Image (cartoon, rainbow, N blue to C red):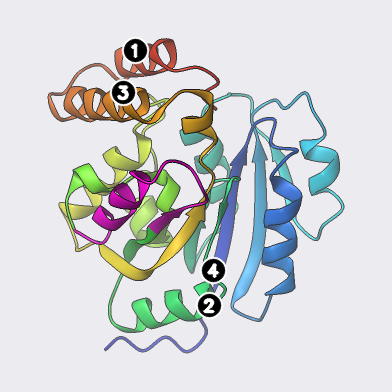
């Protein structure tokens, strides 16, 4: 078991027009603040709604990215942190109430990187199967909705997210993590919005996800994957 005297976690949230979700997430995080939570960083990709104004009501660092790209936004946030652990979280997700305890336990058990399981808020019943599968290892069962934590030094060693990816950036990072260390799955769920399924439908989103993963595993150009995904589905953030 690894000895961690003072766990330091920085939450990094990439945003783009998230006025409907960001207040609830920041309220949740700030209400559960303790010494282990070093900082919350909001990295905006060019919002035109009230996302930034809402975020500035909270004790968080707000950064403006020149690029509307989640990988670039998350890398920008990470560059402001020199040590400890990074916890990347989507704006439409809510981690477990005990997420800091869970991260601390995982780190003390030797984890340098990992994620939580997934639980969808509402949506078609078939999403329960999708959520169930996130308890297993394997690239097909991963994704950014589950959030991702990683030691700063390891993140820097891997040179962060590959900014060529506009989607699938988490898959690429996890693949590189697995080349040098293990990837832990914490047995508690992050709750995530089903808005993508509401804007499209279960079958269409599932087919898009399947094809995007296949394209990624075959080594297709990241731009090509992003173009396919965003043309196939509507209202993708």
Foreground disc of the pair 2, 3: 3
Residue to which mark 1 is pinned: 228
Foreground disc of the pair 3, 1: 3
Q: Does dot 1 land on a helix, a strand or a loop?
A: helix
The quarter of the rendered structure image containing the N terminus is: bottom left
Q: Does dot 4 land on a helix, a strand or a loop?
A: strand
Q: Where is residue 106, by image quadrant?
A: bottom left
Q: Whole-Å distance between the Cαs marked 3 and 1?
A: 8 Å
Contact check, label 4 and label 2, Cβ < 8 Å: no
Mark 2 packing: few (<14 Cα in 10 Å), some, or many (20+)?
Answer: few
Instruction: Residue 95 in the image: state x and y as whole percent.
Output: 53, 63
Q: Which mark is residue 208?
A: 3
Residue to which mark 2 is pinned: 98
Residue drawn where x is 56% and y is 36% of the image: 73
Span colored in magenta:
118-136
> If you read the primary sequence from the N terminus, does the residue marked by circle 1 or circle 2 appear first?
2
Looking at the picture, tell me which residue is in the foreground, 163 or 218. Answer: 218
> If you read the primary sequence from the N terminus, does the residue marked by circle 3 or circle 4 appear first?
4
Contact check, label 3 and label 1, Cβ < 8 Å: yes
């Amino acid at each position: 078991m690894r000895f961690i005297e003072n766990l330091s976690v920085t939450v990094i949230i990439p945003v783009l027009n998230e006025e409907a979700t960001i207040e609830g997430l920041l309220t949740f995080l700030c209400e559960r603040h303790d010494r282990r939570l070093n900082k919350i960083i909001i990295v905006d990709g060019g919002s035109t709604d009230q996302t930034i104004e809402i975020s500035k009501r909270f004790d968080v660092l707000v950064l403006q990215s020149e690029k509307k790209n989640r990988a670039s936004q998350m890398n920008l946030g990470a560059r402001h942190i020199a040590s400890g652990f990074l916890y990347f979280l989507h704006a439409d997700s809510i981690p477990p109430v005990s997420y800091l305890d869970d991260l601390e336990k995982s780190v003390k058990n030797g984890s340098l990187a990992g994620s939580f399981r997934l639980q969808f808020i509402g949506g078609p019943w078939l999403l329960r199967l999708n959520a169930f599968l996130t308890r297993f290892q394997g690239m097909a069962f991963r994704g950014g909705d589950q959030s991702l934590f990683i030691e700063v030094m390891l993140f820097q060693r891997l040179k962060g997210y590959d900014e060529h990816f506009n989607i699938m950036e988490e898959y690429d990072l996890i693949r590189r993590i697995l080349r040098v260390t293990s990837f832990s799955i914490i047995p508690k769920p992050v709750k995530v919005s089903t808005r993508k399924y509401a804007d499209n439908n279960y079958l269409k989103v599932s087919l898009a996800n399947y094809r995007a993963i296949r394209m990624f595993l075959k080594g297709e150009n990241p731009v090509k994957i992003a173009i396919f995904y965003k043309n196939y589905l509507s209202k993708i953030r």
